[in-house]
Image (cartoon, coloured by chain):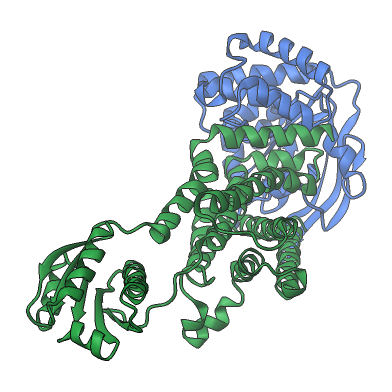
């Protein structure tokens, strides 16, 4: 046991003395959460917009006033015709155009119904989506206001159309995705690099020649990353909750238990990679391309799986983070218990066993 | 060099190691006495590394009777490993740890107690004149020091035998000479030295030398006797005479 603690101590020295490791371990989760958090949660400010007002009456004037005084939007252009829209968007400043139909005010009073069209530059889909919802929010408020004040049963209908990207997906929830990415990065990539480093430096030979058995060596290598990954999981959930208000509706204990399972899986993948990779460089490349890219692209973190072509949807099933993200979303956002995530849990467990088995097999062949 | 005691610490009888159709070690038999400096020579691919791995308990032989430090390589690996030291060309110290941290780590994995580690480390640093560097990182030390330290760490737990796999690779002649002084000293203390090298002048420093060609031991004797047998001026010529027969040189 003493030997084992000596080993752990050495591992922590390696980690704490390496600036790169420290940066990945502690800088990365925070930076990622901040980045993704603000990409999605940014309060809009001074979005440049244009108005095409075919009606020019007191209602449209009042609405424009409401919108520009909200602080979210800034009116920089008045258009004369819809034909200008495309050119204005292409110029790039204007992100959103508000179109009032002819006789908007009159129709509003007469038919209790006025139509507005919102055109957005969706070359940046997330922003476009945000802008539309903010604008709709303002219009909604106005709608309620005039209903109250003027005792009218009016309804303003806003119809939006996304320019440059008409099939916009709903905003993704980023905390589960970041959690999967970071745990994968820390557990799998860092362990595989750290084991590969011992091989590269020749210290692995010394360890193998020593009375330590291979299991002790591997446990010594992975335990620090298990601990640090767990801390990362806490930090991510904590930051999501306190900074961005991402809820944990389900059981926190269950959430952490599932996270530990996923960390074990990632560690076993890291060990497997290190049995294949002879150098740190190879371990890093393998982790990057075999783990990180699929984690980010195919796990449903950023791109919804149901929108992928069928072959990719099938492939996504073998991407471990996909299942973890499902579990996280279920527990955190839907607040369900174990009875709703046991299938995914079993899949993760089976994958962990699989990778440990593969690693053992590779290791035995090498020693024969 | 006291060879009278003549305790055999390495006994190898008919060692064979096959990888599929390839025979890496073909029926090796030799013995090494306590305190002896045994040179294990051969071209790359001759099967040296395979044999060393077996002797260190890292891989099993296909057949043969082998005991190292009195322990059987099949059944008593754990004890065997406790009683040997190992150092390779790569020096095997952790560059990001200090001198003392390295000593403590290696002492620790061989199960030495904290007190023993501290007192032995003090003695060692004094002997190597490295007290001032005790808390310096290995990365800041010159190559020669690293190498001496690596050797001292390899025998820190007082093993019966230390295996040195090309320990002087890439080191200048002066440092090499100093390194051999350490080897002699260890040998005088009764530690058996099992060393591979590419430098034929170093082969002359050994008590006995074996030369492997294509998985077989083609010659085994004292350097003086070998030179006589091959009618050679130095070990280089002996080695070349044997290596010419090889088919497996990489």
Percent across and percent down for residue B4 are 89, 20
Residue A360, quarter of the rendered image: bottom right
Q: Which part of the image, by quadrant, shows the C terminus of chain B?
A: bottom right
Q: Which part of the image, by quadrant, shows the N terminus of chain B?
A: top right
Task: Indicate the colour of chain A.
Answer: green
Q: Nearer the viewer, residue A101 or A21?
A: A101
- At x 53%, y 42%, the residue is A26
Question: Relative to B92, is A319 above or below?
Answer: below
The answer to whether any part of residue B195 appears in the image is no
Tell me the blue chain: B
> Residue reaching furthest bottom?
A111
Percent across and percent down for residue A269 are 65, 60
Q: In the displayed structure, does residue A6 sit left or right of residue A14?
A: right
> Residue reaching furthest left?
A80
- At x 77%, y 34%, the residue is A5
Q: In the displayed structure, does residue B163 sit left or right of residue B141?
A: right
Q: Nearer the viewer, residue B161 or B97?
A: B97
- At x 25%, y 81%, the residue is A116
Q: In the displayed structure, does residue B187 sit left or right of residue A171?
A: right
- At x 88%, y 34%, the residue is B69
Question: Relative to B117, is B211 above or below?
Answer: below
How many numbered marks does the figure carry?
A: 0
Question: Relative to A156, is A231 above or below?
Answer: above
Q: In the displayed structure, does residue A169 sit left or right of residue A316?
A: left
Q: Nearer the viewer, residue A93 or B173?
A: A93
Percent across and percent down for residue A267 are 67, 55
The answer to whether any part of residue A216 appears in the image is yes
Q: Nearer the viewer, residue A328 or B18?
A: A328
């Amino acid at each position: 046991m003493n030997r084992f603690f000596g080993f752990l101590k050495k591992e922590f020295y390696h980690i704490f003395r390496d600036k790169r490791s420290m940066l990945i371990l502690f800088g990365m989760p925070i930076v990622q959460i901040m980045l993704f958090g603000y990409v999605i949660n940014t309060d809009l400010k001074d979005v440049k917009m244009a108005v095409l007002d075919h009606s020019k009456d007191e209602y449209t004037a009042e609405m424009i006033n409401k919108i520009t005084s909200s602080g979210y939007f800034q009116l920089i252009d008045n258009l004369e015709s819809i034909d200008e829209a495309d050119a204005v968007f292409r110029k790039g400043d204007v992100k959103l155009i508000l179109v009032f139909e002819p006789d908007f005010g009159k129709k509003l009073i007469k038919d209790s119904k006025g139509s507005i069209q919102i055109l957005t530059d969706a070359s940046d889909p997330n922003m476009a989506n945000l802008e539309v919802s903010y604008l709709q929010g303002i219009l909604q408020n106005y709608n309620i206001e005039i209903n109250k004040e003027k005792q009218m049963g009016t309804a303003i209908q806003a119809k939006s159309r996304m320019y440059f990207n008409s099939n916009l997906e709903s905003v993704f929830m980023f905390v589960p995705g970041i959690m999967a990415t970071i745990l994968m990065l820390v557990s799998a990539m860092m362990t595989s690099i750290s084991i590969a480093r011992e091989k590269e430096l020749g210290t692995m030979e010394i360890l193998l020649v020593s009375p330590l058995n291979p299991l002790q060596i591997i446990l010594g290598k992975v335990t620090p990353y298990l601990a640090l990954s767990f801390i990362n999981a806490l930090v991510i959930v904590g930051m999501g909750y306190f900074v961005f208000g991402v809820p944990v509706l389900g059981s926190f204990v269950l959430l952490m238990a599932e996270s530990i399972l996923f960390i074990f899986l990632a560690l076993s993948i890291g060990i497997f990679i290190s049995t294949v990779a002879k150098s740190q460089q190879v371990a890093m490349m393998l982790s990057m391309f075999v783990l990180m890219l699929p984690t980010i692209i195919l796990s449903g973190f950023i791109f919804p799986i149901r929108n992928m072509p069928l072959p990719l949807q099938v492939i996504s099933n073998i991407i471990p983070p996909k299942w973890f993200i499902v579990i996280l979303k279920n527990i955190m956002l839907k607040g369900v218990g174990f009875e709703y995530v046991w299938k995914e849990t079993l899949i993760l467990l089976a994958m962990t066993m699989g990778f440990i088995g593969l690693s053992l097999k590779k290791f035995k062949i090498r020693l024969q | 060099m006291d060879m009278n005691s003549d305790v055999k610490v390495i006994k190898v009888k008919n060692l064979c190691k096959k990888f599929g159709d390839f025979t890496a070690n073909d029926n090796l038999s030799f013995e090494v006495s306590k305190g002896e400096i045994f040179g294990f020579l051969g071209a790359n691919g001759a099967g040296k590394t395979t044999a060393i791995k077996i002797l260190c308990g890292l891989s099993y032989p296909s057949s043969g009777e082998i005991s190292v430090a009195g322990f059987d390589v099949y059944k008593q690996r754990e004890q065997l490993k406790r009683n040997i030291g190992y150092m390779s060309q790569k020096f095997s110290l952790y560059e990001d740890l200090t001198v003392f941290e390295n000593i403590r780590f290696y002492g620790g994995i061989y199960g030495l107690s904290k007190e023993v580690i501290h007192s032995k480390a003090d003695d060692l640093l004094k002997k190597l004149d490295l007290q001032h560097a005790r808390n310096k990182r290995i990365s800041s030390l010159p190559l020669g020091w690293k190498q001496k330290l690596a050797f001292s760490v390899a025998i820190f737990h007082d093993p019966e035998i230390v295996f040195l796999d090309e320990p002087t690779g890439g080191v200048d002649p002066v440092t090499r000479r100093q390194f051999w002084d350490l080897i002699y000293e260890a040998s005088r203390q009764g530690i058996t030295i099992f060393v591979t090298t590419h430098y034929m002048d170093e082969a002359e420093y050994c008590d006995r030398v074996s030369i492997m060609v294509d998985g077989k031991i083609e010659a085994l004797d004292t350097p003086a006797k070998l030179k006589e047998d091959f009618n050679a001026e130095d070990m280089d010529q002996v080695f070349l005479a044997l290596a010419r027969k090889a088919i497996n040189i990489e």
